[in-house]
Image: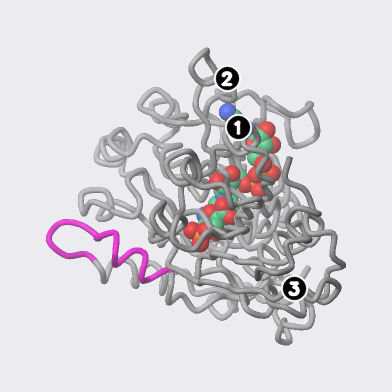
Amino acid sequence: MPNASTMNNDNMRPLTIVADSNIASLNEFFNASTLGQETKRTVKIFAVTGRDINAQLIAELQPDVLLIRSVTPIGAALLADNNSVKFVGSATIGTDHVDQDYLAARNITFANAAGCSKHSVAQYVLTAILSLRPQYWQPSIAPVTLGIIGLGNIGSTLARYAHDLGWQVLGYDPLLPASNINNASLAQVLSQSNVISLHVPLTDRKDDANPSGSDYPTRHLIDKNALDTMPSETLLINSARGPVINAHDLVADIKHTGRQVVLDVFEHEPEISEDLLSKLAIATAHIAGYTVEGKLRGTQIIYDALCEKLAVTPAQSMHTLLPLNMFLWSELKAHPERLIKFYNIMQDDAALRSKLADGQVKGADFDQLRRDYHLRREWQS
Ligand SMILES: NC(=O)c1ccc[n+]([C@@H]2O[C@H](COP(=O)([O-])OP(=O)(O)OC[C@H]3O[C@@H](n4cnc5c(N)ncnc54)[C@H](O)[C@@H]3O)[C@@H](O)[C@H]2O)c1
Ligand SMILES: O=C(O)[C@H](O)[C@H](O)COP(=O)(O)O
């Protein structure tokens, strides 16, 4: 069984890491002084575009460690012919791109970055709502009910901001106990909310062929049936995973109802059809979690997990890498007119729409927008 000693004692050989070049501060976190200070082991790091991490590359480089983000599918197709990888770290919250059963069966340690961008995504959602409906800053004039589907790290963080703004929260999460926010059925959330925001993982139904699936699958959770129960004035926001909404049904719904819809994630990502894009109130290129803080926290979490695996003491901290942050939630609350300075979401919307050509946004253009994204700052609460 691979363990710290099999990864550490092979000191003749450098610790070899293949990593997605889109991981923040890769070289600051993964180098000989932050990983090998106790063992004197050298570190070789190959930074590659996430979609280019494939079986051939892994066979060629024989890495000990794979560090990825959400665009590299991890499973048998990538690793079947490889015996060198002992640790996979995904600097993301979502894990739907990782076959964790396969990794466990191969005794490959896996770590993801749970919660790393929970404030960033919650702030993205607030910005979308308040940009489209500025009247919601004053809930006494227009009572606001925010429906939240999925009340984990992001959903519960969003609920705290909502309460702080005086909004009511109707929440649904069948996998958590009832609480002051887990207080409604799915049908109630769908039919009684002014805004619905999705914060679930992408899951498929559990069955014999898929024992690690869910009894509450989320793929196409929002389909024609669900949309039909939502009043046409209800604003729908998806910053979870694209396939949680059936894109075909959504296009038909918007045509019929004129509903305002905000998407940061798309069913056929990284491609987006003009038919869908042209109907959205706000569309962004899967950047809801893209803040300096959110991305660095993601790196820190998988770095700490790798240190644990290697049995070395962590020697790098994101706090030494963070520039000064002047964005205060208390200031924004007192000065709603400053929202555009805190986050100009319409700029991100325009950047995505500018990539539309020949009836679609192409995958390469979508990926490039994300690679070149100027990271926002998280508002401090
Ligand atoms: N757009 C982005 O940039 C971005 C950034 C971070 C995360 N995400 C996505 O957001 C998702 C949620 O993130 P999180 O940190 O809150 O995850 P989390 O695991 O902390 O919470 C997810 C919650 O969803 C609940 N859930 C599962 N199935 C459900 C169902 N059928 N109905 C209602 N609730 C259900 C779970 O019980 C859990 O409480 C991630 O899985 C990821 O895919 C997107
Ligand atoms: O799950 C997550 O953490 C996010 O969706 C993540 O921000 C996606 O970004 P990527 O990994 O594609 O850079």
* Magenta segment includes 337: no
- Neighbor class of circle 2 (other Cα within 10 Å; few <14, some 14-19, many 20+) is few
Label placed on residue 41: 3
- Residue in the image at 63% along x and 23% along y: 185
Q: Give the CA separation, mark 2 to mark 1.
A: 10 Å
Outermost front residue: 12
**Of callouts 2 and 3, the N-terminal one:** 3
The percent position of residue 350, horizontal first and vertical second, equals: 34, 71
Task: Please state which of residues 309 and 347 is positioned toward the viewer in this rendering.
Answer: 309
Identify the element where label 3 is drawn.
loop
Which residue in the structure is indicated by mark 2?
211
Which residue in the structure is indicated by mark 1?
101
**Of callouts 3 and 1, the N-terminal one:** 3
Q: Give the CA separation, mark 3 to mark 1.
A: 31 Å
Q: Is residue 280 above or below residue 223?
A: below
Amino acid under disc 1: Asp
* Magenta segment includes 361: yes
- Quadrant in which the C terminus appears: bottom right
The percent position of residue 39, horizontal first and vertical second, equals: 82, 71
- Quadrant in which the N terminus appears: top right
**Of callouts 2 and 1, the N-terminal one:** 1
